[in-house]
Amino acid sequence: MERVLKLRQAMEERNLHAMLVASPVNRRYLTGFTGSSGYVLITDTGSFLLTDFRYMTQASEEAKGFTVIEHAGQVMETVKELLQSERINELGFEQDHVTFGTHGTYTEQLESVKLVPVAGIIEKLRMIKDDGEIEVMQRAADLADAAFAHVLPFIKPGVTERELDLELEFFMRKHGATSSSFDTIVASGERSAMPHGRASGKVIQKDELITFDFGALLEGYCSDLTRTVATGNLQPQLKEIYDIVLEAQLHALEHIKAGMTGREADALARDIISKYGYGDQFGHSTGHGLGMEVHESTRLSKLSDDVLQPGMVVTVEPGIYLPGLGGVRIEDDIVITADGIRVLTKSSKQFTVV
């Protein structure tokens, strides 16, 4: 219930006495409940998980410390009753997870209760991972590493990107993943110049680059790994940009530390790529927060003033993309620590020809 206590502290800072949580990810973060339907209501004195008949047994087993209630046909009727019982007439709600139509329903059914929009209150708590979360994320990273090692022997001219994608997916699922963290990117040849080139029916050719960007969703937490390999002899410029991206990524990993802003962390990689004349070909941020979702708060971006803190997990993923020729990205997951970083992903970054 430590997470609930931290949420109550954040609510107190906003002078809120009740908070309704509708986001499935935030619901699981607070309660441990893995079902697909439910709401969390946190008040000054109560912690409630409202769900339907299908999940009552499961919710009681998973949501330790919560009062589990089977809600009425209209969920807001139950919310209204709980608020009335505690004499609360204001309710915070997650403005980023509630549609305009749903807000109208809340307003109509809660009648005299004042709705207070709140942004990022739980997402901010999720930015700092505890030891248990980091342990799961290490296992998710280990699984991604194992999947990459598994797929390497399958890479050869004649197979399709989608076949390699499926090989990764089957391996991760077979070894405990709920699913992949996101739609796997397998981008070969000219398609490797597409930062988000999802696996297609393209056939792998000899003498080209292939970028793999994928991760495992394991026990509610994501990993996110990118490696770029070659299938033979490359045009000299492609080998050149591989070496530059690797230099930039290793430099960033060596110097990122707590207290640094996202802008400063981004510059560690970006300045090196720009020094070699490829700044315009590195169009995305150097990294992002990682956790229960593959993109979370904290950005390593030239626009970010977020301050890195111990316990944050972020990606470090510079890249160079040359349309019509190919591209390179190299990515690791790291934990910010009090005295530096800990790298979760371990797959080799040595230039590899398969």
Image (tube, rainbow, N blue to C red):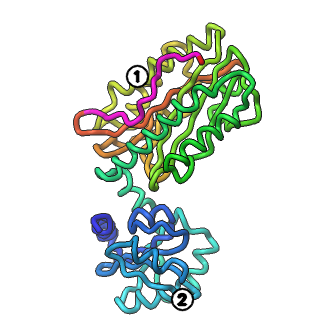
Say the numbered circle drawn on residue 295. none
68 versus 12 height, above or below: below
Residue 259: image quadrant is: top left
Q: Upstream in the sequence, badge 2 or badge 1?
A: 2
Choose between 177 and 97: the one closer to the eye: 177
Say the numbered circle drawn on residue 250. 1
How far from the left and from the top, in percent, is residue 301?
47, 36
**On the rendered structure, is 251 left or right of 350?**
left
**On the rendered structure, is 59 left or right of 354?**
left
- Judging by the rendered image, the residue that carries numbered circle 2 is 72
Q: What secondary structure predominates along the stretch shown in magenta? A: loop
Residue 168: image quadrant is: top right
**Callout 2: helix, strand or loop?**
loop
**Callout 1: helix, strand or loop?**
helix
Residue 327: image quadrant is: top right
Do the residues under discs 2 and 1 have CB atoms within 8 angstroms?
no
Magenta-span inclusion, residue 234: no
Instruction: Work out how far the residue at label 2 is from the one at label 1, CA to CA, in angstroms.
Output: 55 Å
Count of marks placed on residues: 2
